[in-house]
Image: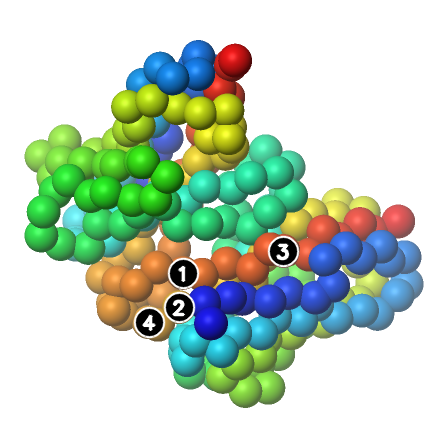
Amino acid sequence: AQSVTQLDSQVPVFEEAPVELRCNYSSSVSVYLFWYVQYPNQGLQLLLKYLSGSTLVKGINGFEAEFNKSQTSFHLRKPSVHISDTAEYFCAVTLTGANNLFFGTGTRLTVIP
Amino acid sequence: DTEVTQTPKHLVMGMTNKKSLKCEQHMGHRAMYWYKQKAKKPPELMFVYSYEKLSINESVPSRFSPECPNSSLLNLHLHALQPEDSALYLCASHTPGQGTEAFFGQGTRLTVV
C-alpha cells in the first residue's frame, strides 16, 4: 500500500524568506508525485509534478521540488515567499497506471509580513 | 479549455431534501472523481468513474449516489443527508494511467441543516 506523510501541519515564515515543505511517501512500486495548492474556499491547483527523468522539478509561482528515491521524499521549496503564497499545500501520490490519488494531510503555509 | 466546472458553488439543503451536484469537463479526460473535504483536512476520495463506469466506491453511504451520463459529465445525487455531511465537495478529472495531473473544480460548499 502507498501513503504520504507531510511532517509539518503548519509552517509560518516571514515574507521574502525561503521555505521548505516536507513530504515523504511509501510505496513498493513506482509512483507519480504531485504538489497541489489550495487557497481558501477554492479547489486544488497543481504546482508541479514528478513523473520520471530529472529529479529537480520546477513548477508555477517559483516553486520547485526534488525527488529523492533513496529517502522517498519529495520536498517543496521556494527561495523567497510572498504574502500571496499563504495557502494549504498538499503532497499527493498515485501509482503508475492507477486511478487513485492519495493525499498527505496538508501543510498550512502562513507568510508573515 | 483546462477547466473543471462545478455547480452550484454553494448549496444549503435540509435533511429531507433531494439535490444534485454537477461537474463538467471538456478536456477529453476519461476518469472523473468525487472527493469530500472537511475543514482543515485533505480531500477524501469518494468515487471514481473510469471510462464512464464506476470503478471505485470508497464505502460511501447510499445517501450519496453518483452518476456519469457521459464522458464529460459527472453528477452526485444527494438524499437524506446528515449535518455531518456538510463539507466542500470537489470534482476532478484526468487521463488514467498516463501520469498526468488531476484537474480539480472549485468545489461545491454544501451545508446540511
Q: Nearer the viewer, residue B76 or A39?
A: A39
Local secondary structure at mark 4: loop
Label 1 – label 4 distance at C-alpha: 9 Å
Q: Which residue is mark 4?
A: B96
Farthest bottom residue in view: B70
Apparent side of residue B16 relative to residue B95 in the rendered image (left or right): right
Could you say where residue A3 lies in the image, as x and y percent from the top left? 32, 42
Q: Nearer the viewer, residue B104 or A86?
A: A86
Which of the marked residues, 1 or 4, is nearer the chain's N terminus? 4
Which of the marked residues, 2 or 1, is nearer the chain's N terminus? 2
Label 4 – label 2 distance at C-alpha: 6 Å
Residue at 52% in and 81% down: B72
Three-letter residue code for mark 3: Gly
Say whether marks 2 and 1 touch (CB < 8 Å).
yes
Which one is closest to the eye, mark 4 or mark 3?
Answer: 3
Three-letter residue code for mark 2: His
Which of the marked residues, 4 or 3, is nearer the chain's N terminus? 4
Local secondary structure at mark 2: strand
Label 2 – label 3 distance at C-alpha: 16 Å
